[in-house]
Image (cartoon, rainbow, N blue to C red):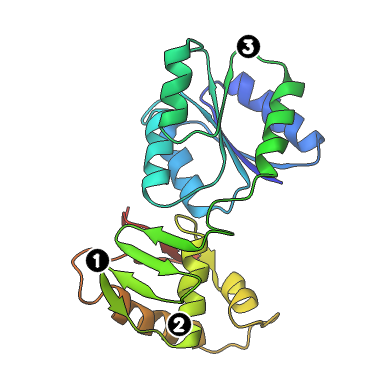
Amino acid sequence: MRVLLVEDDTETASFLTKALKESGHNAEWAADGATGLELAREGAFDVLLIDRMLPELDGLSIIHTLRKEGNQTPVLVLSALGEVDDRVKGLKAGGDDYLTKPYAYAELLARVEALSRRTIPGEQATRLVVGDLVLDRLSHAVTRAGEPITLQPREYRLLEYLMKHAGQVVTRTMLLENVWDYHFDPQTNVIDVHVSRLRSKIDKSFDKPLIHTVRGAGYVVRESDG
């Protein structure tokens, strides 16, 4: 399991990342909110552990931004604020669970593993939605701002995969394996060509692009271009 910890307390972060790794998980750490948001956007994590009080960008703002962009990675909010209103705010912002400090590591680990077992919304959903773009997986109909968009079968599979991972960077390898069924790189520009065609249909007639290139990494579908 791949876990991102966003925590500004160095001692706490060091303990948690070490403990998670010893429990067999891949743990990455961000010491401030801005870095945490960037990593959450770019990495395919199974669970996010986000502290509420962070420098540069607070935890609830991170969660709200990710949810707005379509990123549905499960989030466990960590906070010293334990009143009912505080917990409600954390869950309303898009958090999936809320753990009040101080906590026992065994409980944190149990909650993380429980979150990782949840089906990520979008994996089995019949409709995928990012902004005003809607993909119906039953009828294979695609619309943007209510306008129908006609896609070829490969373009549909490409868009479906990108939207299933909305808010996360999808690499060339991921696309080759899951859209083209290639388990090797054929050294062609097939992905670039299809993404370009998809962009011309999804973004060209609209002011706000949804398909973004992440230089040196891959592609991401999200509302924001930040």
Which of discs 1 and 2 lies nearer the camera? The answer is: 1
**Image mark count:** 3
Kindly indicate the quadrant of the structure image that contains residue 173: bottom right
Tag 2 secondary structure: helix
Kindly indicate the quadrant of the structure image that contains residue 214: bottom left
* Image location of residue 79, percent across then percent down: 52, 18
Gap in Å between the C-alphas at discs 3 and 2?
49 Å
Q: Earlier in the sequence, mark 1 or mark 2?
A: 1
Q: Is the residue marked by circle 2 packed among few (<14), some (14-19), or many (20+) residues within 10 Å?
A: some
Q: Residue at x 50, y 46 (%)?
A: 40
* Relative depth, front residue between 142 and 164: 142
Q: Earlier in the sequence, mark 3 or mark 2?
A: 3
Gap in Å between the C-alphas at discs 1 and 3?
46 Å
Amino acid under disc 2: Glu
**On screen, residue 30 above or below 194:** above
Tag 3 secondary structure: loop
What residue does disc 1 label?
145
**On screen, residue 195 above or below 84:** below
Q: Residue at x 40, y 59 (%)?
A: 129
Gap in Å between the C-alphas at discs 1 and 2?
19 Å
Q: Is residue 175 left or right of residue 112?
A: left
Amino acid under disc 3: Pro
Q: Earlier in the sequence, mark 1 or mark 3?
A: 3
What residue does disc 3 label?
102
**On screen, residue 108 above or below 168:** above
What residue does disc 2 label?
155
